[in-house]
Amino acid sequence: MTEEVRAEMVASVFKVLVAPGDSVTEGDELVTLESMKMEIPVIAEVSGTVREVSVAEGDVIQGGDLIATIE
């Protein structure tokens, strides 16, 4: 089963903390977003292996944009 991690708001990608192939545990931080000078962690809701990271540091993303997939 593949879990899609999507943005909840318009933000800039401040830091990418995982790469494809990385193992993550539920609760691990995947990326840090920045919006209105606040840093917002994006957390894995499932444990598994990162299949894809769809953002890069400096990207501006919209609500609903795909950030990563976890298998």
Image (cartoon, rainbow, N blue to C red):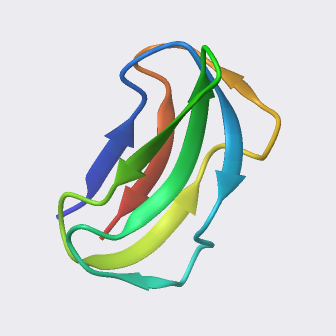
Given residues 38 and 16, the one toward you in this image is 38
Q: Which residue is drawn at 79% across and 45% down?
A: 57
Residue 55's image quarter? top right
Residue 34: x, y in percent? Answer: 62, 30
Figure check: 62 above or below 37: above
Between 28 and 4, the one nearer to me in the picture: 28
Q: Where is residue 48 in the image (x, y as percent from the top left)?
A: 28, 79
Horizontal relation, residue 65 to residue 70: left or right: right
Residue in the foreground of this view, choosing between 14 and 62: 14
Count up the numbered dots.
Answer: 0
Which quadrant of the figure contains the C terminus?
bottom left
Residue that appears at 43% across and 28% down: 7
Pinpoint residue 40: horizontal percent, then vertical percent: 47, 38
Q: Position of residue 24 (x, y in %)?
A: 35, 80
Q: Is residue 23 left or right of residue 20?
A: left
From what the image shows, is residue 51 above or below residue 5?
below
User: Is the residue 25 above or below the residue 56 in the image?
Assistant: below
Quarter that holds the N terminus: bottom left
* Residue found 40% across the figure and 47% down from its top: 42
Is 12 on the left-hand or right-hand side of 65?
right
